[in-house]
Image (cartoon, rainbow, N blue to C red):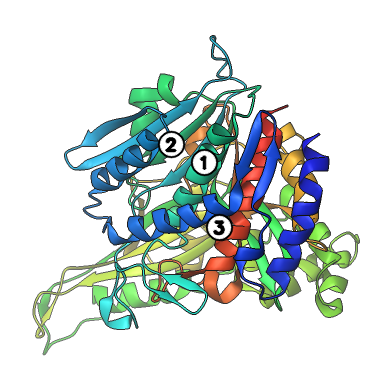
Amino acid sequence: MARRIFHGFSLLAGIIFMLTLPPATLKSQTPTQGGTLDLLQLTAEAQTWLTDLIRINTSNPPGNELEAAKYIQSVLQKENVPAEILEMTPGRGIVIARLQAGPLPDSSRALLLLAHLDAVGVDRAGWSVDPFAGTQKDDYIYGRGAIDDKGMVAANLAAFIGLKRSGTRLSRDVIFLADDDEEQGGNASIKAVIERYWDKIACGFAINEGGNVVLKNGKVQSVAIQTSEKVAYNVMVTATGTSGHASIPQRDNPVVHLAAAVQKAGTLETPLHLLTMTRRYFEQLASVEDEDIAKWIRALDTSDRADLAALRLAAMNPVWNSMLRDTIAPTELTAGVRANVVPPQASANLNIRLLPGNSIQDVIDQMQKAVNDPQVKFTVQPDAGPSAPSSSITTELYQTIERLAPRQFPGAVVVPYLSTWATDSAYLRLHNVQSYGLVPFPLSEADILRMHGNDERIPITSFRVGIDFLYKAVHEFVTK
Ligand SMILES: [Zn+2]
């Protein structure tokens, strides 16, 4: 039933997106089970929520997410939905609300809508607008968190409120969670939320950030649903040697040995490794990619040219390179206390991202072999991310999104996505949650790259069309 109801609306939304008609042409009344929902009105309200959330500075550290949590609580209160705020550490909080399907909750069927309230900091000098003003310019809302992840907070909130307003008869509970401390993963993060309050958010399915609706030449090319993610490690590389007067340098100067080690580790090409999910990602992408790329994707399936194809693809796109191998990125250097003193030690941090299932010791062995220097040692830091199993691409939720996406965005392919970055989903997956990363807004590569960077912004049309898409996917899944 939902399919029929939504069909006309999807086409319209697709057309609206591809052209530049204002979102005001969105069909305003969408009938749903149990009533009608004014989606146009809802997306307009969501725009206000997003702007208001950007104006609450939740740069992490320190985060101060409690104020944003309280704001959301007040929005939900107006809808007569009780929302609970949990203060994780002083000033840092999360907000949870639930729409119940029946008197007895079945957590294995429940859907969690997850997004984080904190954002990374800003380098104000690099911004053309105030990053915390929620400035609207042309078709954009600017601000830190506009995409990552306040846009998603507002979209989840809209989908959740939409279900309430429409009086949708639910077949499973829907839980809204806006959490904190995602960007730093400290003691207020999802790990702590799960440890302390799992009973409040227990679920079998989740939608979170992690994958993107990718816009190319003004048209949606692919809808990437994140099903797994790489595992982050920090490894300290340390060189030691003789400290002394800089006027009498010796061969064992640790700064020299460290520099050589960083150069070798930082340029090391780890072996290519095509995971089943990544193979599927490329296969799906082949139908919408340019022929010079598609031909190499097709070659992945040949016995004689697969290795060459992976090599070519890795060279074409740094993201693909990172999806195909473990990566090593030197990020911090520490050495010396005086300009004229050779220090006894010099060190660097290597940020390493492993493909799921790979071992950090293997990478260290490769680096040790390449560096081949007894003065240099590698130490794994204790802050590694979790290694979680992938979410399945045969669940009802994945397939619902897979079915709806091409209707919303004609011509787009749906691809399972291994993200190179970490998200809260890994912790959910460790709790048997089928968690999917899907930021529903059509975004160009250039806008995606502004996340964590300067002038982060979201196109307003994309924001509203994305909410429409998310609402439909959620609605279909929670009425099943
Ligand atoms: Zn994020």
- Residue 211 falls in image quadrant: bottom right
First along the sequence among labels 1 and 2:
2
Residue 103 to residue 389: above or below: above
Residue 259 is situated, as x and y percent measured from the top left of the image, at: 34, 77
Mark linked to residue 420: 3
Q: From the viewer's perspective, tell me whether residue 196 is left or right of residue 66.
A: right
Q: Which of 101 and 222 is in front in this view?
A: 101
Residue at (41, 57) in percent of width and height: 48
Say which amino acid is labelled 3.
Answer: Thr
First along the sequence among labels 3 and 1:
3
Mark 1 vs mark 2, CA separation in Å: 13 Å
Q: How many labels does the image show?
A: 3
Cβ at disc 2 under 8 Å from ligand 1: no
First along the sequence among labels 3 and 2:
2
In this figure, which residue is indicated by the disc labeled 1? 425
Say which amino acid is labelled 1.
Answer: Ser
Residue at (24, 34) in percent of width and height: 87
